[in-house]
Amino acid sequence: MEVETSLSGQGMQPLLKVEKLVKSYERKNIAGSREKLLALDGVSFAVAEGTTLAVVGESGSGKSTLGLCITCLESPTSGSIWFEGRDIVALAESERRRLRPQIQLIFQDPSNSLNPRWSLEEILLEPLTLQGGLKREETKQRAAALMAQVGLSSDMLQRLPAQLSGGQRQRLAIARALALEPKILILDEALSALDCSVQAQIANLLVELQRTLGMTYLFITHDLAMAAHIADEIAVMNRGRVAEQGPAQKVLRQPREQITRQLLAAMPSLEPAVRPPVES
Amino acid sequence: MVPILEVQDLHVSYSSSGGASQSALAGVSFQLMPKEILGVLGESGSGKSTIATSLLKLIPSNGNISRGSVFFEGKDLLRASAGELEQIRGKRISLVYQEPSVALHPTIRTGEQVFRVLAAHESAAKSTLRKKTQRVFASLFPEEADRISKSYPHQLSGGQQQRILIAQAIACGPSLLIADEPTASLDPTTQREILGVFRTLREELALAMIFITHNPALLAGFADRVMVLYGGRIAEMGPARTVLSSPKHPYTRALLQSMPQNLENDNNGRKTKLPVIAGDFSAAQVPREGCVFEPRCQERMEDCRKREPAPINLGECHTVCCFKYGG
């Protein structure tokens, strides 16, 4: 497949480049025989610094596995993941550990990804303490600064996650991810569990952070409308492969692949022109 | 036509462990016609799920239905006995939940799970009920009814699991289906497929439906009427086409504007911001005088702070609770 990206023409060095990534899972069925499941079947793409690549696809297309491989939470079966010119798959664990803070993951449901018994301050301080190098006073200042960065008041630092609304919790998850000054955020359905009006608020926060910090995003989603809004490029995944990739507008306006057309047709939309009525 | 369901002035509140009482629904009234699909649109905390559970008196033990009536087939469900309710729940009115992987029993074959619903409500011979179960499966899984009914839930996809929940819900031939975010955990392709199933059932079984969701886009082209809930009150209600294409209430309007709509991003890569509703919902949870949306409203007026707006009729069954339109 020919990958058409904004990078190709400009000779820019991508921040993240994935090459022929394969991840297969083996599962034993009840009779004890093994089946192979190819979650990623030769995925390649690149993301330029300061841009957003949206990875879209149906459930089971491999988008979440991709995020897990890039954040080193799963090790790929084969292939390479180049981050700032180094292949993190091939790195020794000690070196990889130094790179990992720069790649942060944000999950779908903030109520399941925050420790319910920790105060917001403890949640924000954990990555800073683990990474070391900061004095107690400095970490406290940093926690307050992080809160401000995501639009939360530092008065709330002593609260528990349960005392926050869904949107505030996702803001906190973003603040925690920002604590170690990452270069790229992997957002795995980070907006899907939120109410529509809250989705808009968090999407705006992401756009704002990209503008001020030059953040790079891998935005994994099944929401094409949000992908169109937030992404520079879109990669459409299908059965563990990238079916199509290119500038967001081009992929959605002139889809080349059947799967992209299918996803567009299934897209819930308020405009009757875009969306035919549900057949009965 | 006689409405199949008539809800009048429903008030529900929950008490917290501290003893404080939090209002979830404050005076909700609506009617549902046979074969009608009513979309209930609301954010978390708007009271939309409380509608689903309070109609069948299934609210948690700290909930209290303090006022109102729910007339269904000539009976007020809120005043019905436990025995009477058991005859109605799952038989005349069914509930479909959000998360199929949690709602199904993990170690019972799906066919048996549907069979048990039938057995709980009908006294016919086992073989008759088995045949009926097969028919329900055949209608929802035309191609592989047999295999699916012999499967365990974990062997099925999310969409198939949701169809099993629907099979349970329609097995006894109800006249009203209440679905609380039935497609929230599914991807858009499967979502659309399940909406198609609901439409088919409505035609084939003459089902009326209350479809609860936070996503307005799901209701376009699907629901007949839309009820917009905010802070336990109906902000706006009317034909789906009217409410979704020319919303009148400032909340509905702001909500629809906050969604990325067209696939354009016109300004050459410069990412724009989405219009948002300022503040958050917690403002609506503080009991106060006046309109519940006033603290976040862009179009607030003098009156909004002083008293609560009553529903204004804008014609064609379209009502809105806002002083902009009189009152």
Image (cartoon, coloured by chain):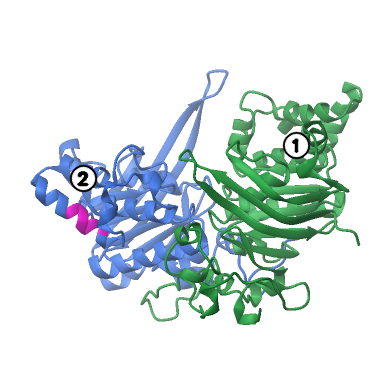
Above or below, A224 relative to B139: below
User: In the rendered structure, does residue A235 fall within the stretch colored magenta?
Assistant: no
User: Residue visible at 72% across and 27% down?
Assistant: B150
The magenta-colored residue range is: A142-147
- How many numbered circles are shown? 2
Chain B in the picture: what colour?
Answer: green
- Per the image, the residue denoted by label 1 is B168
Q: Is residue B296 left or right of residue A156?
A: right
Disc 1 on helix, strand or loop?
helix
Task: Judge whether residue A187 can be spotted in this image.
Answer: yes
Q: What is the x, y in percent for residue A142?
A: 17, 54
User: Residue visible at 39% across and 42% down?
Assistant: A22
Of B289 and A117, the residue lying toward us: B289
Q: Is residue A145 left or right of residue A66?
A: left
The chain drawn in blue is: A
Residue B192, image quadrant? bottom right
- Per the image, the residue denoted by label 2 is A125
